Structure formats: C-alpha cells, structure tokens
Image (cartoon, grey):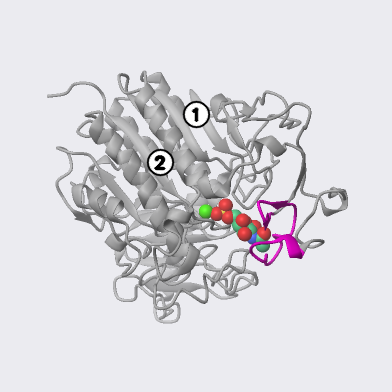
Amino acid sequence: MNNTPPNVIILYADDLGFGDLSCYGANDIPTPNLDKLADEGIKFHQGYATAATCTPSRYSLLTGSYPWRNPNAAVLPGDAAQIISKEQPTLPKMFKTQGYNTGIVGKWHLGLGDGKLDFNKSISGTPNDVGFNQSFIMAATNDRVPCVYIDNRNVENLDPNDPIEVTYDWDKAFSDVPNGRSHPELLDVMYDHGHDGTIINGVSRIGHMRGGQSAIWNDETMGERFAEKAIEFIEQNQNTPFFLYYAMHQPHVPRIPNSKFRGATPHGVRGDVIVEMDWCIGQLLNKIDELGLKQNTIVIFSSDNGPVLNDGYKDQAIELNGQHKMAGPLRGGKYSLFEGGTRVPFIVRWPDTISEKHSHALINQVDLYHSLAKVIGYELTEDEAPDSEQQLEALIGRDPYGRESMVLEGMQYKKVFRDQRYAYIPPHDDDFICQYTGNEKGNMSSAQLYDLFDDIGQLNNLTDAMPEKVEQMQKLLDDSIKNQKTR
Ligand code: NG6
Ligand code: CA
C-alpha cells in the first residue's frame, strides 16, 4: 500500500459542452483518451462549473468562492490586473502547505500584475504569487492579446529591443500594426463581432499589440506546447507529491488545430480541436502510466463553461455542426442561465478508490477545494473557500446525492438557483438571446422554474403551477447571497 499522498491533476477544457465528448454522447468526435479516463474512473452527469464564462469559473475553482462575491470576476482583457490577491487563500497554496509542488500550464485568465502591468519586465502578480511554484501560461484567452507565452514571470523568447505594447482601447490602436478592420485581406479566417484588433498569425484578435515579434506564439503548436510543459512538470516532480492545473485552450476560438488533426471530424475546426485536446491529454496520461504514477494520482477533467459555435470568427462551426449536440440534451450553452451554460463533462479517476462508473450526484467545481483538502488532511481556516462544500464522498462515487443546492452564474453576476430537482431563474433585465453568438442567455422579465427530473431540456416553465416553490427558491437564493458561510 502506498502511503505517499496522491498527486492531483486538474485537466480543464475551455468552452467544452456537456455533449462534446464521445463518452458523453458525441457520435463523431472521437475522444478515446477521455473515454478511457471515464471508463477507468467515474463520470458525473450533474457536474458543474460555477459560471457560464471563463474567468468566473476559474476564479471559483482556485479560490473555493462563488465568482459573484468578487466584482472583478468577469471576463477579463489580456492586460487586466490579477483578481486573486496575494493574501487570499487558494487551492494551490493549500497543496503547498501540505508539501506539494504546484504547477499551472495553459490558460490563466485571472489577470496579471499588481499595479501597472509591463510585459517587458519580470511580472509581480502571476500564478507564482498565488500559490503555484511553477507556471507556463497565456495571459487571457487565445483570442486576446498579448499572444505570447509567459514562463513564470517573464514573456518567453522576448527580444528586449522589440518591447511589447498592449492596449484594448481603439483610440490608442497602433496605426503601424495591421488590424482586422484595416487589413481584412491579410486574414486567414474572417472575424465576427469585435475580434478585429491586431492580426497575429493571420487571425485578428481582441485588443491591440505591437512588438514582441520573437515571442509570438504559434497557434498550431499551442496544444503540443502546453502538453509538453505539463509533461515536463510531471517528470520533474515525479518524486514529490504534486498538484498540476493543466488548463487547455481548446475548443475556445480561434480554433486552429495542428495539421495532424485537421479533418479529424466532420464538424470542421471545432470538432478537430476537441480531438486535438484529447490527444494532448493522452500524451499526459501515457506519461503518468510510464512513470508508474497512475495508481497514486487523482485525475479530474472538466470544462470552464458550456459550448458555443460562432464566438467571434466565421470558422464554419455553424455550417458544419450538423446534428451534433454540443450540450447534449441541455438547453443553452456558453453565456447561458440554462443548464448548458454550466453543466459540463466531469470525470474523476482515482484507481483503487473509485469503483462506481457513473454518478448523478450534484457536484460543483467549487467543491474541489474543500474535498481535496479532506484528501490531503488539510483543515480549512474559518473564512477560507467559503462556498466550497466537502463533497469527497460524492466525488469518489460513494454518495449518490452530493450538494443539496447551489448558485450558478450566467453572465455578469446573473444567477440561477439549483436544488436537487429544480432550476430557478429569477427575473433578469437583459437579453434572452446573446446578440453575438445566438446562444440563449435565458434572461426573462419574469421568473422561470424548471423540473430537471422531468424536463432536462427546460421547456416547461412551472412558475404559474408552483408559486410556492418559486417563493422558496427565491428566498434560498437571497439567503445564499447574503449569508456567506463561515466554518
Ligand atoms: C467575450 C468574447 C468572446 C470570448 C469570451 C471569453 C466578444 C463579443 N465576445 O467577450 O469571443 O472571447 O469573451 O470567453 O468580444 S471565455 O471562455 O474566456 O469566457
Ligand atoms: Ca471558457
């Protein structure tokens, strides 16, 4: 029997929907590595991100706090300040106190810098300042500048004679740098809604950057690079317990698969990058096997929010989607208050500990903090990870029930209250349809109540039939907002 504490790896996809993997019902997107992971572990049918967008969900995963408790936890530009303070307790800090080496590879999107952010200097206010021993990241998203990798505190491969400048203000856009608006003839893929800033590798991005030419990433090898870095971290730390947060960029826009994966699915680039992501995960899991670490490593896979077709580029995701149901049977997707916004694939593998194959327990990524604390024998302080429930029994398949209830976020702090059976969406004064993507955000001027046992597709609004339930859910939501738990 192995007495060393288990390694923990969180694999985190970007905009992957509940129905996007073959093990979750996709018919023609082969994801053999994740299917195998699910087969060797447990697959959750009610696993959730805390929000339907990226920054908020990632904030919750790392802090154990609902995102709307922090007004800065909204989708961030690439030059935003770090929104997790250096003092705040975090998941990687927790692991560190228990003697783990901690690393992050991939998408950060929680801001950088603790004041004036200068990409040409060593940055203070990085993942390394909030609990990670090592980091290799992109600042925000692959559709936002700066399009460079940041290796711990410094931009990788930066030539000091060609400094990077970044702005998100069109009035300050660099007139000598081609952008999508001024030079559409230079584009390999046409932009849509707002992705018309600086052109990098034939793709115009959100925001503007100048300089840093030697540091510009290659979109086609991004998947491989992150996989290599994640593997390197595991190799370096194979003899100490480690915590690795591997946050992949797929299938977020722009979807630019390596040529090896072009045409891997009938769904064009959106399907192809999912296959690429699965391949990257396969590389990493093979390494875990090869190093003999499989038995003592907990591997968790999930996604930061639901799926979307056109999220800023005319990349034919819509035309080639065919019959594929990105969110499976769920309504809505990214940005949505409906289930498709936050219910995502959620797989956990822990050999010898987990024997169940499926779970319908209600489980949220925000619970990983407290549940993993239990695994490594860490006591949370009074105000640490306030919204994180200790759900280890559910996470390892021994409790089929999980959370009693939870608060989910659509966009801009708009909330849903979910209990074991019902989803309650209060009246929200905003659009029903997202004008950019066509996804249903789900806002209505009157309340909505859905019975998810009978109506997983959320078509039958029960507010008129069940006024008392509506009242009860509104009250529980108000209480959750007001009463931040202390332990
Ligand atoms: C939105 C972008 C979208 C995407 C998203 C972030 C527009 C109109 N839309 O603001 O393209 O970048 O932010 O995605 O600019 S996330 O998965 O990181 O939350
Ligand atoms: Ca996302």
Q: Quadrant of the N terminus?
A: top left
- Assign a secondary structure to mark 1: loop
- Assign a secondary structure to mark 2: loop
Left or right of 419? Residue 118 is right
Residue sitting at the far left: 1
In the image shown, does 83 or 170 lie closer to the viewer?
Answer: 170
Q: Is mark 1 within 8 Å of ligand 1?
A: no
- Three-letter amino acid code at the position of disc 2: Ser
Mark 2, other Cα within 10 Å: few <14 / some 14–19 / many ≥20: many
How far is disc 2 from disc 1 in space, using C-alphas?
12 Å
Does the magenta segment cover residue 152? no
x%, y% of residue 129?
57, 25
x%, y% of residue 189?
64, 64
What span is in magenta?
184-205
Does the magenta stretch mainly form a helix, a strand or a loop? loop
In the image shown, does 285 or 114 lie closer to the viewer?
Answer: 285
- Three-letter amino acid code at the position of disc 1: Pro
In the image shown, does 170 or 364 lie closer to the viewer?
Answer: 170
Q: Is residue 63 visible?
A: no
Residue drawn at (22%, 47%) of the image: 41
x%, y% of residue 431?
63, 72
In the image shown, does 151 or 269 lie closer to the viewer?
Answer: 269
Does the magenta segment cover residue 204? yes
Mark 1, other Cα within 10 Å: few <14 / some 14–19 / many ≥20: many
The disc label shown at residue 200, or none: none
- Mark closer to the chain start, 2 or 1: 1
The disc label shown at residue 388, or none: 2
Q: Is residue 121 above or below residue 396?
A: above
Residue drawn at (40%, 81%) of the image: 465
According to the picture, the residue beneath numbered tag 1 turns out to be 89
x%, y% of residue 89?
49, 29
